[in-house]
Amino acid sequence: MMHESIEANLKERDVGKRENGEVFVMKVALQLGRSLSELRDVAASSSRKRERY
């Protein structure tokens, strides 16, 4: 469900309907039970892993 929410927000063309980026990141962090810095660390780690392949 969270994956679908993120995808929908990223694909929304109408800027007025899109969630504010910072608010959206905070909401995702809360849903995952992580702090913003932990969420950013996880995202950075994931990005580095994808670059290797």
Image (tube, rainbow, N blue to C red):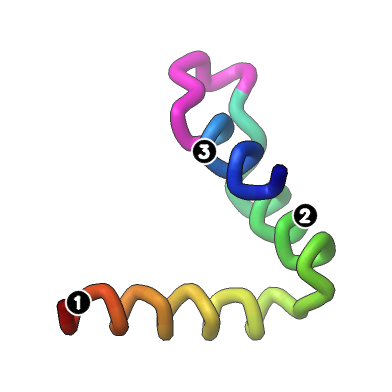
- How would you classify the magenta stretch by its main secondary structure? loop
Characterize the local packing of mark 1: few (<14), some (14-19) or many (20 or more) Cα atoms within 10 angstroms. Answer: few
Residue topped by disc 1: 51
Q: Nearer the viewer, residue 29 or 15?
A: 29
Quarter of the image that includes the N terminus: top right
Q: To which quarter of the image does residue 28 belong?
A: bottom right
Residue under the image location 74 percent in, 60 percent down: 26
Give the spatial CA distance, label 1 vs label 2.
27 Å
Q: Amino acid at mark 3?
A: Glu
* Residue name at image x 52 percent, y 21 percent: 15
Q: Residue at x 29, y 82 (%)?
A: 48
In this picture, is 9 found above or below 26?
A: above
Q: Earlier in the sequence, mark 2 or mark 3?
A: 3
Q: Decide whether residue 13 is among the magenta residues.
A: yes
| Rendering coords of residue 18 (x, y %) | 60, 27
What residue does disc 3 label? Answer: 7
Q: Tell me the SS state at disc 3.
A: helix
Q: Secondary structure at mark 2?
A: helix
Q: Which residues are magenta?
A: 10-17
> Which marked residue is nearer to the observer: mark 1 or mark 2?
1
Q: Residues within 10 Å of mark 3 (few under 14, many from 20)?
A: few
Kind of residue at badge 1? Glu
Do the residues bearing badges 2 and 3 touch, measured as CB atoms within 8 Å? Answer: no
